[in-house]
Amino acid sequence: MEKSINLLTENHIVDAVSKINFSGNVIPESWYHTIVNNSGKVNLLSINILSDIVYWYRPTEVRDELTGNVSYVKKFRDDELLQRSYEQLCEKFNVSTKQAREALIVLEQLGVVKRVFKTISTAGGACPNVMFLELFPETLLRLTFPKNDSDDVSPEDNTSSPEGKDVFIKKETPLSENVNTNTKTTTEINTEISATTMVAEETPVDVDVVQQTKELFSEYNFSDDDISALVDEAYGDFDKIQNAYYCLKQQHSTITNAVGWLRKAIRRGYIPKYTPDQEAKSVKNSFNNFSQRNYDWDALEKKLLGH
């Protein structure tokens, strides 16, 4: 008797879906019970980011067409860790930098992911505070296959959103849009391994918020820790830092702790009375700052004509 294979299920929706080739990240069902907050609510952003990280750490199978040998290669270029910026996470998941940071911190609290900041060499010079993400397979296995039932998840498996500003310790240096980053999303397999992230020689590295802040406060000789504290206080918003700087310059009283005062100004959203551009414009127009005379033009014309 001839065997036949029936690929139809007699359900038109199921049959239609079977023809769609799905691809992308994988989310195990158990994560909805192990990656939760203190109230038992799932932390969806942390789950999605972890799924993306796991995708990049999953090796790709490569088969030799002639010999039939099978080998496995990694998807990213760095020898050890996956490079991922906040900008990439924000763009992929349509979230803010603050949300992306908090989600990563949740994963750090679980012990499954750790942020590592490195200084890498580029054609444009050293680029500090580039973020890499380290994945811990043992913890990943425990979160994916918990020993207990989902109702008996141990307290250490629960996590909550971070509280306070102590969680925003470090901000990575964003790379130029023209940088050939280690984690460029692509379906192609890149077997080339590079120890550094390179930039085209004609394209300089973009000035990041940390460098902008250093230049802004160059006259104060702040330490790197002081600069980092200001950037963290502003959550990387340079406009807030600049407003605090202008407010500091416009103070008439002596300020003994400039960094502390600036952090308070950033936190409270101080707005300067004027910016340097506004001040220059005001000085430039001060010559014309007087009341104009009012003339009776009809009477003046009659007088000039001798009427």
Image (cartoon, rainbow, N blue to C red):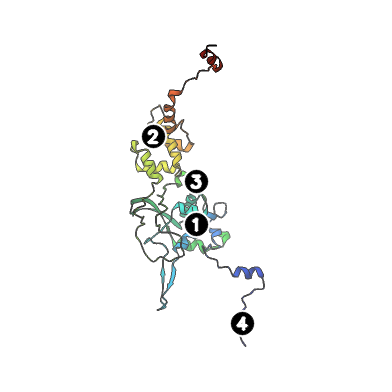
- Badge 2 amino acid: Ala
Q: Nearer the viewer, mark 2 or mark 3?
A: 2
Residue wearing tag 1? 49
Residue wearing tag 4? 4
Q: Nearer the viewer, mark 4 or mark 2?
A: 4
Circle count = 4
Residue wearing tag 2? 258
Residue wearing tag 3? 163
How far is the residue under mark 1 from the one under mark 2? 38 Å
Residue 222 bears which disc, if any? none
- State if disc 2 and disc 4 touch (CB < 8 Å): no
Q: Earlier in the sequence, mark 1 or mark 2?
A: 1
Is residue 153 visible in the rendered image? The answer is no
- State if disc 2 and disc 1 touch (CB < 8 Å): no
- Badge 1 amino acid: Ile
- Badge 3 amino acid: Glu
The front one of 14 and 111 is 14
- Answer above or below: position of 134 versus 276: below
- Within 10 angstroms of label 3, few (less than 14), some, or many (20 or more) residues? few
